[in-house]
Amino acid sequence: MRSTREKPQPARSKGLDDKLYVALAERLATLIDAGTLAVGERIPSVRRLSEQFKVAPGTVLHAYRLLEDQGRIRARPQSGFYVCPTRQPLPEPRSSTPGPRAASPTVGDLVMRMSEMSAAEDVVPLGHAIPNAACLPTQQLNRLSAAISRRTSRGFNYYDVPPGCRELRVQVAKHYIAAGCGLSPDDIVTTSGCQEAIGLCLRAAVEPGGVVVVDSPTYYGILQAIEMLGMRAIEVPTSPRVGVDLEVLERTLSTRKVAACLFVTNCHNPLGFVMPEDRKRKLVHLLARHDVPLIEDDTYGDLAYGDQRPSVCKAFDAHGRVMLCSSFSKTLAPGARVGWCAPGRYLEKVKRLKFCNTIATATLPQLTIAEYLAAGGYAHQLRKMRRIYRDQVHQLSQAVQRNFPPGTRATRPAGGHVLWVELPSGTDSMELFDRAADAKISIAPGPLFSTKGDYRNFIRLNCSVPGDAQLERAIQTLGAFAEDLSRAPTAKVRSA
Ligand SMILES: Cc1ncc(COP(=O)(O)O)c(C=O)c1O
């Protein structure tokens, strides 16, 4: 039997609709974990298992390839599949310790450099956190959009006005019941993606020059928005498991004039944590005591791997201080640019700002997504994406473990599709970014995620790229560069 690395991979996204092979892989994984199939042991042949479980040989092969991608089994040429030794996962990065100084972020130029780099067709796209196009229901959305266009010309010949298409707002309000929110469609303003929602909420709550507290590291789009609006940011220590340090936040709120907080609470980008519900509740109460609004970015909330949709801080907000922002960019259609916010007591201000900004969000994408949600297939779509991303994050993490130098750490995300990797102390991720760019690999260097150029020895990797030989080679190349840079004489000096 040949290794899957030697031949083209099957179209996994197509096969994933058929849950049989996933169930079979999970069953075998349980046997491996329990030691029934021991390390080094040959697992039953495809033919034997297909007879035993009464499934097609192709289904067994798919299950074996999934287990192989997860690093649980390995094919030996002409011999079969064998159980791999289980590795301890990489250690996690520690909580961040940013200083208390307010700073004006300056990430804009670097974001543009990375964006241009990531847009090139021949690049392995580990930089931008773009969804896996094969996982998106694009054909369905195209069909709905065409049907809507035949039925009504509203998609093109009509000016929508804030708060945006009611059909969509109704669906968003319904969807957020699962996150603990009792939103009315009238609480919601539709926007051009979450990025616009964040910008509108910032402008509604913070004057130019005002201070916004953010988690650290945080998504560079947030820092870019703060930068563009002439505001300043204070980063607070953030744990890769549970989120922002509430004690330090309390001290910051007591000693500094803070206009707003802006936190990613679910499937954090880049750390991957889901903030536990009791901390969400405490955060809302803390901010209420200090009368400070929270802009809550829930862009990835639907992609948490657990069985239940995580709650949002907005669910605990009795006084309209939480401004919840999200979009369908990661789960349905990044190009549709459909997002929204529920800005609480800032609703009227946000509506006026939205009107000034772009008048309204494009109508046809709003109607299309509203119909898609109303038709009821979203829950299935999310289940599929979560499973794919959980597997791919796991695989990429293992590939990093195999190929990166000793001393590397990596997060264990609870959702989404990014991995935050800490390189050995002093390894320069900006230098790694340049070398990777020359090798046609895009990565997101750590300083993008900080106001002051911190996280110089961190990178963020996008894991939505399906595992194949090209990805494996890219990780090997990055690992070799990282190894080399970790030995550079400057590395020691910088980390001193
Ligand atoms: C945490 C976070 N917030 C907001 C955005 C922007 O979302 P959108 O594409 O909907 O504007 C992103 C995009 O990557 C993100 O990761």
Image (cartoon, rainbow, N blue to C red):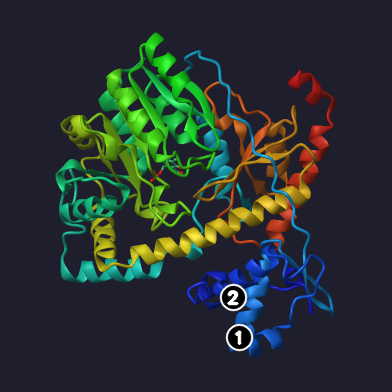
Residue 302 in the figure: left or right of residue 242: left
Amino acid at circle 2: Leu
Which residue position is annotated with label 1?
A: 53
Quarter where residue 346 is shown = top left
Return the x and y of residue 379 as percentages of the image width and height: 36, 63
The residue type indicated by label 1 comes to Phe
> Where's the N terminus, which quadrant?
bottom right
Dot 1 or dot 2: first in sequence order is 2
Whether residue 215 is visible, yes or no, is yes
Which residue: 54% across, 32% down? Answer: 239
- Front-lying residue, 170 or 119: 170
The residue drawn where x is 60% and y is 29% is 447
Q: Are marks 1 and 2 in contact (CB under 8 Å)?
A: yes
Residue 422 at x, y percent in the picture: 67, 36
The circle drawn on residue 264 is none
Considering only vertical position in the picture, is 116 above or below 40? above
In space, the residues marked 1 and 2 are separated at their CA atoms by: 9 Å
Identify the residue shown where x is 53% and y is 57%: 389
The residue wearing badge 2 is 24
SS of the residue under disc 2 = helix
Q: Residue 492: give x, y in percent of width and height.
A: 80, 23
Most foreground residue, 44 or 346: 44
Q: Residues within 10 Å of mark 2 (few under 14, many from 20)?
A: many
- Of the four image quadrants, the one with ligand 1 is top left
Q: Residue at x 41, y 18 (%)?
A: 250
Depicted 109 relative to depicted 77: above or below: above
Mark 1 secondary-structure assignment: helix
